[in-house]
Image (spheres, grey):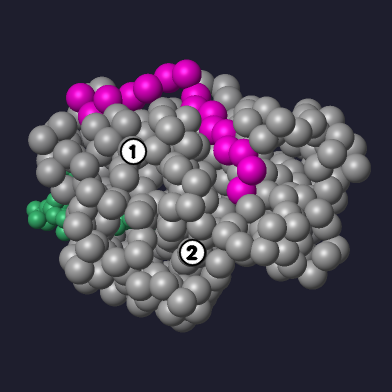
């Protein structure tokens, strides 16, 4: 028995914003952004929502797998930017894609959310509780970004990616191993306040309602922890760095990915990137890139892939799979 990704999909808002356009909003330049991050443009919502983007990505993943919404047993949406507190984004996606039989709920582990959702689904499928799962990572970060803060607004983009997983009789391949970690003690380095504590009996203090980040701390956390998590997941799968065909990593910053590659002593050709075009899309980043690679025909049967996500929480995880 194995659990396999049978289909992928993704969706991006129509509007693409270049670095030059951002330089009209804040004191920055195309040169600075490209040099420090590798980002050239990002897609920003002009009305698209987490639900609309996730639903589009999910439909494409189902189509890619040759499956229909009514067949879906488990539907998870990883997001830290849902439109509504209630109902959850996954239930709204369920309604839009006609997945009436699915159990649907959201999961928030920020940029590691998609990886954590795949791990959750994998556990259900391995345990025989469900036969398949549809998992989306979807974000509209543009609504929680401070558009006056040049240290953060240049990094993020909106979008969604999705995968459809199925339990197969075939004994080999599919998802081979997982690791996931959380470090709440360091959570303050990347945060965004939710709604105010406010009721007839209590008025909480005002908190900054936008993303706040200590970029250098997040940078060094990622470069240190991700290679460790990747090695841990590879060891669990009985593989080594040299066996990996592609490392599909969270698209936060080109220099972070280069730092991780260096620590793993792996050549950069094995680290595909799309952050130049889409920026950091948090939980959508890994499935968005995976879908692009799939549609470009770059994923061949039998290839060994490592997926890894990391971000606010702090949270991070890695997965080894055979395509
Ligand atoms: O999903 C995880 C999400 N977070 C991340 O991935 C963030 C990880 N961290 C990073 O990617 C980098 O730390 C940043 C790209 C955010 C910042 O790059 P850096 O090389 O760490 O720059 P810095 O924060 O040390 O700032 C260097 C200088 C500062 O000026 P001074 O103090 O040296 O005069 C900043 O004010 O660059 C300035 N700066 C900018 N200049 C032009 C900061 N942002 C900008 C900007 N344009 N957008």
Mark 1 crowd level (few <14, some 14–19, many ≥20, 10 Å Cα): some
**Residue 11 colored magenta?**
yes
Left or right for 216, reference 323: left
Q: Position of residue 267 (x, y in %)?
A: 19, 57
User: Which of marks 2 and 1 precedes in the sequence?
Assistant: 1
Boundaries of the magenta span: 5-20
Count of number-bearing discs: 2
Residue at 32% across / 69% down in the picture? 241
Q: Position of residue 236 (x, y in %)?
A: 50, 78
Q: Give the prevailing secondary structure in the magenta stretch.
A: strand
Rendered image: mark on residue 28 = none
Residue nearest the observer in this picture, 176 or 173: 173
Whether residue 49 is visible, yes or no, is: no
Image-quadrant location for residue 57: top right
Helix, strand or loop under label 2: strand
Neighbour tally class for label 2: few under 14, some 14-19, many 20 plus, Cα within 10 Å: many
At 46% from the left and 48% from the top, the residue drawn is 286
Q: Is residue 268 magenta?
A: no
**x, y percent for residue 144:** 49, 44
Mark 1 or 2, closer to the camera: 2
The reply, left or right, for residue 322 in relation to residue 167 is: left
Assess mark 1: CB under 8 A from ligand 1? no
**Which residue was labeled with disc 2?**
320
Front in this rendered view, residue 70 or 187:
70
Q: Could you tell me which quadrant the N terminus lies in?
A: bottom right
Q: Name the residue under label 1.
A: 274
């Amino acid at each position: 028995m194995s659990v396999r990704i049978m289909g992928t999909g993704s969706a991006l808002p129509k509007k693409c914003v270049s670095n030059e356009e951002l330089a009209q909003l804040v004191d920055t330049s195309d040169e600075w952004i490209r040099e420090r991050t590798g980002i050239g443009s990002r897609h920003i919502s002009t009305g698209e929502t987490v639900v609309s983007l996730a639903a589009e990505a999910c439909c494409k993943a189902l189509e890619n797998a040759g499956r229909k919404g009514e067949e879906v047993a488990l539907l998870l949406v990883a997001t830290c930017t849902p439109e509504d507190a209630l109902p959850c984004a996954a239930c709204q996606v369920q309604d839009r894609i006609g997945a009436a039989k699915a159990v649907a709920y959201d999961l928030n582990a920020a940029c590691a959310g998609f990886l954590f959702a795949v791990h959750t689904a994998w556990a259900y499928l391995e345990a025989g509780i469900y036969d398949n799962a549809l998992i989306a990572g979807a974000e509209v970060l543009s609504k929680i970004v401070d558009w006056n803060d040049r240290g953060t607004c240049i990094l993020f983009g909106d979008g969604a990616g999705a995968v459809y997983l199925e339990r197969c009789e075939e004994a080999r391949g599919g998802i081979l191993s997982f690791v996931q970690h959380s470090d709440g003690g360091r959570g303050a380095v990347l945060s965004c306040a939710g709604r105010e504590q406010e009721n007839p009996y209590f008025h909480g203090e005002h908190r900054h309602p936008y993303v706040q980040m200590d970029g250098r701390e997040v940078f060094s956390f990622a470069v240190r922890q991700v290679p460790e998590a990747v090695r841990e997941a590879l060891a669990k799968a009985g593989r080594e760095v040299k066996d990996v065909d592609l490392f599909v990593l969270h698209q936060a910053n080109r220099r972070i990915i280069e730092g991780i590659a260096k620590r793993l002593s792996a050549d950069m050709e094995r680290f595909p990137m799309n952050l130049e075009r889409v920026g950091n899309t948090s939980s959508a980043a890994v499935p968005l890139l995976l879908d692009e690679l799939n549609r470009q025909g770059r994923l061949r049967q039998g290839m060994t892939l490592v997926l890894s996500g990391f971000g606010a929480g702090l949270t991070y995880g890695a997965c080894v799979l055979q395509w």
